[in-house]
Amino acid sequence: MSDKNNSSVALFCVVFGTIILTVFAMNLERIKEVLKETQFVESVFGSPGKEANKKTEESKEVELKTEIEFAVQESATSDNVARPLQPVEDIFSIDITTVSETTGNEETAPVFTENSGQLLQPDAQVSSAFENAAQKDSENLEQAVQAESEKRDVALYFMYIDSSGNLIRKETARLIPATNSPLTASLQTLLAGTNIEEESKGYISLIPEGTVLLSATVKNKVAYLSFNDAFQWNKYGVEGYIGQLIQIVYTATAFQTVDSVQFLIEGLKQDYLGSEGVWIGSPLSRSSFK
């Protein structure tokens, strides 16, 4: 009796399940539409596609944040000073100078601007400044060469005292500026004294300190030289007077236009030089000291 009841229950379940499946199959499309409209599945189990997209977006956001943080940290470590952004137009407005491989000459390459597209020409003011500087350098060089070429060699005479105490005349060459009065320039150079090279050779000047050449004229190969009062007082005595006269006479007669020298004191002729009585009353030549 019990087995019969169990069989009846099982049969009933099978029949009932079959009926349910049949009804479900017949209304399957309707059920799908209802589930889709109500979004029952998404609300209960969630949308796999949206979750994947959400994870992808979160991953991109994390990567982007990482890149931004890395860039900021790199900038902070490389440079502590914030630099202003350079305008785009300034980047393209740059003059470019190239050098030709064949000639080595500089050429200014045309450059386009991003905004206008026009060729940039070299700055006229800059070019003019370079041209003026080059012209000035050329003029300075020409003046230096001209000044060097306008110098002339002259013979100056100084004195030398040997080991025996004898006065010896010494000739030296000097390079002085060329002028219209070479005799005056030569004598003024002599009055300035010896240079370092001449001093190293032991040359000295016996012309009294403070001597000034007041005037110099040449007539009939006689040089009339007028000195100030300091010229007639020599602290070395007779030898000093003779030495200073030799220096003047030999330096003046080194010019072909001069054979002798007439000494004047303050423009006046006098017979003797100083208290020692050295004769200067007539023109003196080189032969006067032999």
Image (cartoon, grey):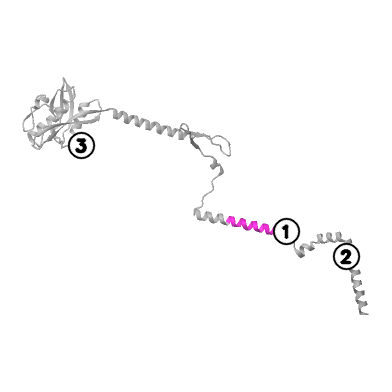
Residue drawn at point x = 76 percent, y = 64 percent: 45
Residue 67 location, x and y as percent? Answer: 59, 55
Residue 60 location, x and y as percent? Answer: 64, 56
Instruction: Determine the secondary structure under disc 1.
Output: helix
- Between disc 2 and disc 1, the foreground one is 2
Disc nearer the start of the sequence (2/1): 2
- Give the spatial CA distance, label 3 vs label 2: 133 Å
* Numbered disc total: 3
Residue type pointed to by label 1:
Lys
Circle 1 residue: 50
Circle 2 residue: 21
Q: Quadrant of the N terminus?
A: bottom right
Q: Quadrant of the C terminus?
A: top left
Residue drawn at point x = 32 percent, y = 31 percent: 144
Q: Nearer the viewer, residue 30 or 247?
A: 30
- Give the spatial CA distance, label 3 vs label 1: 103 Å
| 100 up-or-down from 57: above or below | above
Disc nearer the start of the sequence (3/2): 2
Instruction: Determine the secondary structure under disc 2.
Output: helix
Residue type pointed to by label 3:
Glu
Is residue 55 covered in magenta? Answer: yes
Circle 3 residue: 197
Residue drawn at point x = 70 percent, y = 59 percent: 52
Residue 217 location, x and y as percent? Answer: 18, 24
